[in-house]
Each structure stands twice: as C-alpha cells, then as structure tokens.
Amino acid sequence: MKAIEYLQYGEAAVLQLNEVTKPSPKPNEVLIRNHASTVTAADIMMRNGKPLIGRLYLGLNKPSRTILGFEFAGEVVEVGTEVTLFKPGDKVFGGTTTLGCYAEYVCVSEHDVITTMPSNISYQEAAPVSGSAITVLNFLKGLANIQANQKVLINGASGALGTYAVQIAKHYGAVVTGVCSTGNVEMVKALGADQVIDYTREDFTKNGVQYDIIFDTVGKRTFGECKNSLSQDGIYLSSVIDFSLLMHMIWTSIFGKKSQIFLNRDASSERTFGLFSGN
C-alpha cells in the first residue's frame, strides 16, 4: 500500500510517499481502507520533533513511528477474530493514538475512538471530528469544568482545535472571545464567538481583560504571559507542553491559585490524562 512516511525529523521535505507493507489486524483490531485523514498542528510538531520533550514519545534521534496521522474516515475491510462491534463494509471514523493514518490502510482497535459514520456526512467531513472535537471536550468540560456565563478566551480560534473550542464553549453557555488573524475574524464570528480579537492588531494579554478560562489551542502564548489575564481562580489550558510550562506548573502548584492544565495521551494505555497545578 501507499503511505506518507517521515524517516527523520524536519520540515515538510522529509515526508515521502512510499510503498509499505499493508498491516494485518490483531484479534481486537479492524483494518480500515482509509479515505480521508487530517493534517494538524500536532502532526507538524511531531514531524519537526519539537518541542524536544515530545521525543520521549516519538523517538529520541529519529521517529519510532514513521507514519503520522491521528484521524481517519473509511471502510472496514477486515476484522480481527475478537472483534464484535464492527464488520466488513461498515463506514467508520475516529482517531487513534497509535498514529498511522497517512496511509491507504490503517489498523485500529475496536476499543479506540471509532464509531460508524452518519449517513449524511462525507469521509472528508467525518475525519476531523474525532480528534479535534473530543480533545476540546476533554479540555473544556472534562478538565476545566466549563460553566455557563464564564468568560472564556480561545487562542487560535480559527484552527483545528480552536473552531471546535468556540462552538463547544458557546454550547455550554460561556461568553467566548476568539483570537485569530485578520483573515479569519469573520469566520470565528460566524462560529458564535461573542468577541473576536485580531492578534495582529491587539495583544489580549495587555488589554486588561480577565478570563475564567484561557485555552491556548496552538501553544503560542505561555502561562507567564497569560496569568495576569486570568481571574482569581482562572484556569490556563494548553494543548502543547514544553519545559517552560512544566516549570510554571511546579511553581504555581506551590505558590499560586491560578491553574494550568496540559493534556496529553499515554500511548501505552491509550488513555487521556491531565497535569494540574494550583489550588
């Protein structure tokens, strides 16, 4: 089968279209003929091997998993001997922590994030939902316990996570401010944001407004930059962790009330966990 591989860390030129061995499903897996996947900011960071702390998961000197891609939408063509939830011919979509979705075929555990597709959406529409939307829901509801009327700022509101974050925050009744570039202001407004800040014209960390939740979906603003924009018991969420954030988390857990949360995936157990600091 054909797959896009990267055998070393670097810019887009390291990606290669190669012929690789078609995978075979384990007893608890389904083999999917993949029709659509996504390219996300997380994929780009993994391809670059940055931040360096991510190489503890990816491989220190070179990628241990050479095919990127979390999200898929396609058709089940084969099932393992223990699979009971799916059968060949099922149209499915979802996301997998084991990567491998930049390929014609991918094996996914039936107990991973996978379900049958609604009949009224395409493969291209289904593929982005599982990773981005579920990740945002884990952050805003599962970790931050978002409440109605809270003031929530979404940095990177026009991105893969940000577009879902705006809509999910509004669903829970929050007052939402989106931060994006000039060209995406109208789109973010259309998603439901109560206010949109064009970061090329205004720095939200310097306008004196405080928020109950700041969710940096693109890892561009540090906790140190954002902490004065948080309310007394405000929560800072980041989809990207680096050494600086770890140090801030340790410091805040000892001396501060404002909280920081980072979300990551434990590949060995395929569970989601958060790191918290603050009271």
Image (cartoon, rainbow, N blue to C red):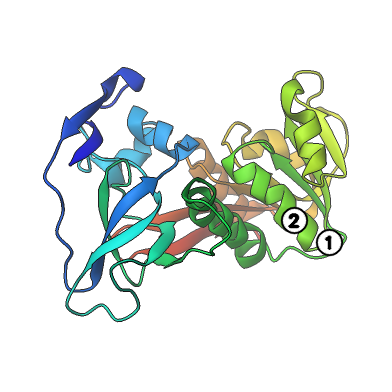
Q: Relative to 65, is 160 on the left or the right?
A: right
Question: How far across and down, in percent of the image, does residue 69 sit?
Answer: 36, 43
| Viewer-side residue, 228 vs 221 | 221
Above or below — where is 163 with respect to 145? above
User: Tag on residue 169?
Assistant: 2
Question: How far across and down, in percent of the image, does residue 37 sit?
Answer: 41, 44
| Viewer-side residue, 90 vs 254 | 90
* Image quarter of residue 204: top right
* Image quarter in which the N terminus is found: top left
Q: Which residue is at 81% across, 41% downward?
A: 190
Q: Residues within 10 Å of mark 2 (few under 14, many from 20)?
A: many
Q: Relative to 219, is 50 on the left or the right?
A: left
Q: Secondary structure at mark 1?
A: loop
Q: Which residue is at 36% across, 41% downward?
A: 54
Above or below — where is 28 with respect to 245? below
The disc labelled 2 sits on which kind of residue?
A: Ala
Above or below — where is 134 with respect to 177? below
Above or below — where is 127 with respect to 119? above
The disc labelled 1 sits on which kind of residue?
A: Gly
* Image quarter of residue 60: top left
**In the rendered picture of this protein, how many numbered marks are placed on residues?**
2
Q: Residues within 10 Å of mark 1 (few under 14, many from 20)?
A: some
Q: Relative to 187, is 54 on the left or the right?
A: left
Q: Relative to 16, is 279 on the left or the right?
A: right
Q: Secondary structure at mark 2?
A: helix
Question: How far across and down, in percent of the image, does residue 144 sit?
Answer: 67, 61
Q: Spatial distance from mark 2 to mark 1, Cα to Cα?
A: 7 Å
Q: Is residue 7 visible?
A: no
Q: Is residue 190 visible?
A: yes
User: Tag on residue 173?
Assistant: 1
Question: How far across and down, in percent of the image, does residue 170 sit?
Answer: 79, 56
> Going by the picture, which residue comes out furthest to the left?
21
